[in-house]
Image (cartoon, coloured by chain):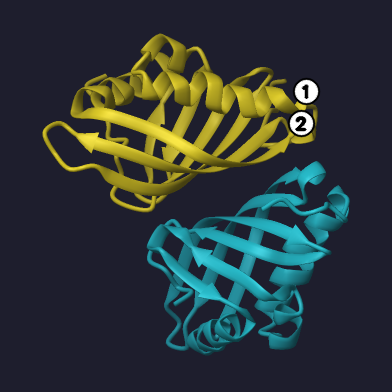
Chain colours: A yellow, B cyan
């Protein structure tokens, strides 16, 4: 699949529940429980995660994406994602999800965001992820 | 709220990207509003702005159409949930003001359909809200 592009042709469709499950039961479950290995296991090695509202781009699962999550987990004492509405599309191997984020900075007040993510998969893993946030970007670059 | 899906994949894409955005880009108010139910809502989630009901949506589009000499939405990448009557799309909006200044946004919309028209629209913008 060398000519892969977001939701492009040549994708192999997975069962519909796979898409909702990787987003909620694997990826965001890992984020909410600060399980970095579980989170990173959802990405391809050369994945790219982009925060669109600030145009912040994190290249590479084991470098920039890992560092970004390490910083997120260190800077916030509680993280919760829920109230999901999914647009799951096996035919294009992609899913777009809307959700609520409740997140508390260390020693601070809880923040509420209403965000969306677009997930484009390569085979069974996230290859391109785009995040839109309803407030200031929380996914800042870490020390890769 | 879950609604009975009535449009297939091709029809969902056609409606969102061609019928709706085609009308918006032509500044065709009647064609734009025909895509919405009377009690539909359009929310710009990245700025927590909601336009509830067709009258409020019309008022917003009146100002939006007047604010730009040309409006172009293009380069759609669609994710389609045919079984649930929902579609999301990323796209570029190129908005050119009367003075020639250009605003470019890389946005994502989520559309929830009921009986072949929009019941709920959520817009996530990469920049400042232009649907005020």
The chain under label 2 reads A
Please, what secondary structure does the residue beneath circle 1 have? loop
Vertical position of residue A122 compared to residue A100: above or below: above
Q: Residue B5, position in %: x, y?
A: 83, 52
- Left or right of residue A68, residue B78 in this image: right
- The mark total stands at 2
The front one of A18 and B14 is A18
* First in sequence: mark 2 vs mark 1: 1
Asked whether the viewer can see residue B127, the reply is no
Q: Quadrant of residue B119?
A: bottom right
Instruction: Name the residue that disc number 2 marks.
Output: A90
Q: Residue at x 76, y 82 (%)?
A: B31
Residue drawn at 63 percent across, 29 percent down: A20
Query: Where residue B103 sits in the image (x, y, percent)?
Result: 45, 70
Q: Are marks 2 and 1 in contact (CB under 8 Å)?
A: yes
What residue did someone put label 1 on? A15
Left/right placement of residue A111 relative to residue A92 reads left
Residue found at x 42% / y 58%: B46
As measured in the structure, the alpha-carbon distance from the residue carrying label 2 to the one carrying label 1 is 7 Å
- Return the x and y of residue A102 as percentages of the image width and height: 34, 40
In this view, the residue in front, A5 or A38, is: A38
Q: Which residue is nearer to you in this view: A95 or A122?
A: A95
For this orientation, the residue located farthest to the top is: A37
Q: Nearer the viewer, mark 2 or mark 1?
A: 1
Vertically, is B64 above or below B104?
A: below
Tell me if mark 1 has few (under 14), some (14-19) or many (20+) residues whose alpha carbon lies within 10 angstroms of its own.
few
């Amino acid at each position: 699949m060398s000519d892969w592009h977001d939701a492009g042709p040549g994708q192999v469709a997975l069962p519909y529940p796979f898409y909702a499950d990787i987003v909620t039961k694997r990826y965001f479950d890992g984020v909410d429980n600060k399980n970095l290995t579980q989170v990173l296991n959802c990405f391809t090695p050369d994945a790219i995660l982009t925060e669109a509202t600030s145009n912040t781009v994190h290249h590479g699962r084991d470098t920039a994406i890992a560092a970004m999550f390490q910083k997120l987990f260190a800077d916030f004492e509680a993280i919760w994602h829920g109230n999901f509405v999914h647009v799951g599309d096996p035919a294009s191997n992609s899913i777009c999800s809307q959700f609520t984020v409740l997140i508390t900075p260390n020693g601070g007040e809880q923040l509420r965001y209403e965000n969306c993510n677009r997930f484009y998969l390569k085979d069974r893993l996230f290859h391109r992820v785009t995040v839109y946030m309803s407030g200031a970007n929380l996914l800042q670059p870490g020390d890769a | 709220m879950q609604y009975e899906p009535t449009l297939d994949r091709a029809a969902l894409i056609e409606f969102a990207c061609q019928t709706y955005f085609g009308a918006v880009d032509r500044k065709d108010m009647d064609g734009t509003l025909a895509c919405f139910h009377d009690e539909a809502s359009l929310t710009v989630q990245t700025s927590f702005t909601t336009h509830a009901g067709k009258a409020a949506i019309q008022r917003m589009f009146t100002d939006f159409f007047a604010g730009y000499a040309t409006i172009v939405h293009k380069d759609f990448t669609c994710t389609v949930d045919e079984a649930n009557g929902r579609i999301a799309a990323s796209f570029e909006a190129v908005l050119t003001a009367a003075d020639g200044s250009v605003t470019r946004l890389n946005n994502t919309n989520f559309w929830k359909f009921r009986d072949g028209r929009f019941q709920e629209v959520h817009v996530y913008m990469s920049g400042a809200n232009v649907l005020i």
